[in-house]
């Protein structure tokens, strides 16, 4: 499996791409292609074009959760597919996989919409929707985790905004992730890990019946975390002993430095490519 960072908050030195506060990852495995999140704008399309990556024939599009920095690119992706159709150019209707709540509108502190700009009805005109709470295999070796159990008492407890359909606080239960079974162990691919990065990893281990972890990449949602969250997270990673950690997007510098004392933290930026060999 080849994983390429199309969008992140950072770029790599001497790589001439653009960053934004969002996340989008391209996954390629043999004859299958998958886009994980779409960032905040059309930047994922622009960076992909500069990298020579063709997004017209995606097999899968996976959304980690509804927030604007992961879903607002959906509007531009639909625009892209429509333009291909107008020009009579070949393209695929990908399968869009996500939690059933991913299209729920969320507002916060005077911000009318924090969630997806694209409605479920609009999305299903352009893609085949698979909205599911249970884990599901996307292709051999790669699994969508579904709704992640929040068993730890130190993470996954915060709410962000208000759900407009109920008027209640949004616990971001739609937050999910991917896991890939490599020959070196599990590769956990997180969007923002609102469920808790430790909960996410533990759920992936349970689903795959595998404890060894080769890599954890994505947003860990460690933004000035309280010590009551950071300390047990560090203890978890120390015991986990992953071969590598690629914390990015919503993980602040101080948290990365703290993680680097217990795990092999690596740099992440737009244009970075990682390769993993399948265990299957």
Image (tube, rainbow, N blue to C red):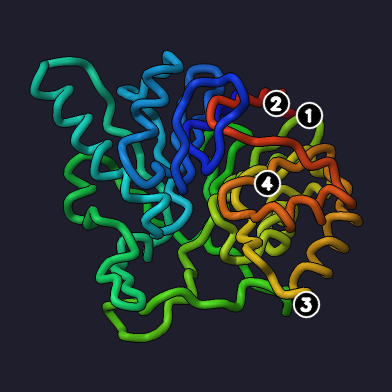
Tell me the CA gap for discs 1 and 3: 34 Å
Question: Is 175 situated left or right of 101 in this image?
Answer: right
Residue 137 lies, in percent from the top left, at 54, 42
Residue visible at 72% across and 23% down?
277
C-beta proximity under 8 Å, tags 2 and 3 = no
Q: Secondary structure at mark 2?
A: loop
The x and y percentages for residue 70 are: 42, 50
Any mark on residue 228, and which? 3
Residue topped by disc 4:
247
Left or right position of 186 against 118: right
Q: Which mark is residue 183?
A: 1
Does label 1 or label 2 sit earlier along the sequence?
1
Decide if residue 179 is in sight here. Answer: yes
**Measuring 46% from the left and 64% from the top, which residue is drawn there?**
174
Q: Residues within 10 Å of mark 2 (few under 14, many from 20)?
A: some
Residue 123's disc number: none
To which residue does mark 2 refer? Answer: 276
Element type where label 3 sits in the image: helix
> Sequence order check: which comes first, mark 2 or mark 3?
3
Question: Closer to us: mark 1 or mark 2?
Answer: 2
| Quadrant of res 48 | top left
Answer whether labels 1 and 2 touch (C-beta < 8 Å): yes
**Residue in front for this viewpoint, 120 or 135:** 120
- Gap in angstroms between the C-alphas marked 1 and 4: 21 Å
């Amino acid at each position: 499996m080849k994983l390429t960072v199309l969008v992140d908050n950072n770029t790599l030195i001497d790589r001439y791409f653009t960053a934004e506060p969002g996340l989008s990852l391209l996954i390629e495995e043999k004859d299958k292609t998958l886009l994980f999140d779409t960032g905040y704008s059309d930047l994922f399309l622009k960076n992909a074009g500069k990298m020579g990556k063709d997004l017209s024939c995606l097999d899968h599009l996976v959304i980690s959760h509804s927030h604007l920095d992961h879903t607002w690119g959906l509007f531009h992706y639909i625009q892209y597919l429509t333009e291909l159709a107008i020009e009579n150019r070949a393209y695929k209707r990908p399968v869009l996989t996500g939690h059933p709540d991913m299209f729920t509108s969320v507002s916060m502190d005077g911000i009318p919409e924090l969630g997806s700009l694209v409605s479920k009805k609009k999305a299903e005109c352009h893609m085949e929707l698979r909205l599911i709470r249970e884990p599901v295999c996307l292709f051999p070796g790669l699994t969508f985790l579904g709704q992640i159990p929040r068993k730890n008492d130190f993470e996954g407890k915060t709410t962000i905004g208000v759900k407009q359909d109920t008027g209640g606080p949004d616990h971001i239960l739609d937050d999910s992730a991917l896991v890939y079974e490599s020959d070196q162990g599990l590769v956990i691919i997180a969007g923002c890990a609102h469920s808790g990065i430790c909960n996410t990893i533990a759920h992936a281990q349970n689903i795959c019946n595998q404890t060894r972890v080769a890599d954890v990449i994505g947003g860990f949602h460690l933004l000035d975390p309280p010590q009551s969250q950071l300390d047990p997270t560090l203890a978890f990673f120390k015991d986990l002993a992953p071969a590598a950690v690629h914390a990015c997007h919503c993980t602040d510098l101080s948290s990365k430095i703290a993680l680097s004392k217990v795990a092999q933290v690596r740099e992440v930026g737009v244009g970075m490519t990682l390769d993993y060999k399948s265990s299957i």
